[in-house]
Image (cartoon, helix red, strand yellow):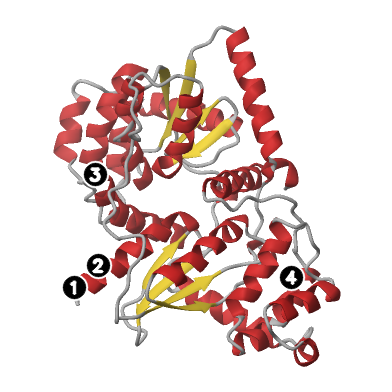
Amino acid sequence: MNKFSSYENFKAIRKIAELKRKEEKRNHEVLYFHKVDDPYSHLTVQFVEKFKDEYSIDIVPILVGEENPETLHEPDLYSIYCLEDVKRIAPYYGIEFNGNSYPQKSLVNKANSILASLNSDEFIEVAKKVSTHLWNNDEIELSNMQKDFTCSMAEVSSALARGNQIRNDSDYYFGSAFYYERELYWGVDRLSHLEDRLIELEAKKIPNNESIAPLFVKAPDKLDSDKEFNLTYYPSLNSPYTFISAKRVKELRRDYPINLITRPVLPMLMRMMTIPAFKAKYIISDAAREGRKYGYEMKDIYSPIGKPARKAYSLFPIIDSQSKGFEYIDGLLKASFQDGINIGEESFLENLVIDIGLDWSEIKGYLNNPEWKKILNDNLEDMYQGNCWGVPSFKLTNANGSNPFYVWGQDRMWLIKEEIFKRIKES
């Protein structure tokens, strides 16, 4: 974990990759993985042509098929959530997305047969049209396009197999992602990191500060209102994404009219889920990259998986009953992902409890109390109600608990602000 999160290692990899590229006299080559029935790919492909126009790069589109099943946890929830998420965020990118359900297999086959027949230059322009027709369930338009671009299903299968192999060799597992010189960038959410890297390499042709995929938000940085909302925060103690979210959760509580409710859940690895090494590598390195972006860098990591986590969780119910639940979780995350501390050490727990203003002599009697297990399980079930299975997840409700709005991921915290702002304007 420390290897993949290390900033020094990150910089060294980039430096070596650039030296090798120059030695081999290669242009800046960016791979783009496109999966036709992935809603995020519909969003991302809208910006690929603009990306190519504004940077001195060679875009190599790679058509891919089904995800590696090892990487999909709760696939039913995942499918529902992805579709809903893209429907929500597309307007903020100025993109129209009309997908109310996943396209039929016959239409997916048509879309793949069109794209598998194209060269790289044709792909970028045609893929946008194909994606629009596919998500509109427009069989007539796709059939019309097949008159000009098509190939056999055997050729489609071969193309998807090649694409999946290239994706796998790049240590990735989904569509809608970019790969450049040993580093991955998932979708529009991470495109800014790739842009920053290319700008540093002086590959931008147009000298401006505008991003390829700007996010058009309306909510202000700070918002005062007599109307208050409940924001439920679902963290886990072994999640690097949870760690990098904690600072912004604290800021959100300060800047927006929310009542913060902290409901921790067990880490995925303690929920009998497995994470392949290549996925873990991406998660940790990506979270570290995002942490640096938001000024909350991962430093010395000591994973709390197993006994340390169980011991720390056992104190949560009593600490939360004294209105210090978030502060406690925040302190545990900082210890695990920044200070390299074993949070299972009783001396550390004692110091943390005292630091957040509680009486250790009262709290320590709850160490290893089994009550936490049911509480965390109930929290997980509540999180699942919003088709969220990973952390951090969030649930926004009105003050009376009505109208729940769930989002998954630290990269959707801006959407929470947008929803609060919208509800206040509509009230």
Three-letter code for the amino acid on which mark 3 is drawn: Ile
Of circles 1 and 4, the one toward us is 1
Distance of mark 2 from mark 3, alpha carbons? 19 Å
Q: Between disc 4 and disc 3, whose residue precedes?
A: 3
Distance of mark 1 from mark 2, alpha carbons? 6 Å
Three-letter code for the amino acid on which mark 2 is drawn: Lys
Is label 1 in contact with label 2 (beta carbons under 8 Å)? yes
Q: Is residue 148 above or below residue 308?
A: above
Say what secondary structure mark 3 lies in. Answer: loop
Give the residue at mark 2.
422
Q: Is residue 298 above or below residue 174?
A: below
Residue displayed at 42% across by 45% down: 189
Give the residue at mark 1.
426
**Image position, residue 202 (x, y; %):** 46, 19
Distance of mark 1 from mark 3, alpha carbons? 24 Å
Give the residue at mark 4.
309
**Image position, residue 232 (x, y; %):** 47, 75
User: How busy is the neighbourhood of tag 1: few (under 14 within 10 Å), some, or many (20 plus)?
Assistant: few
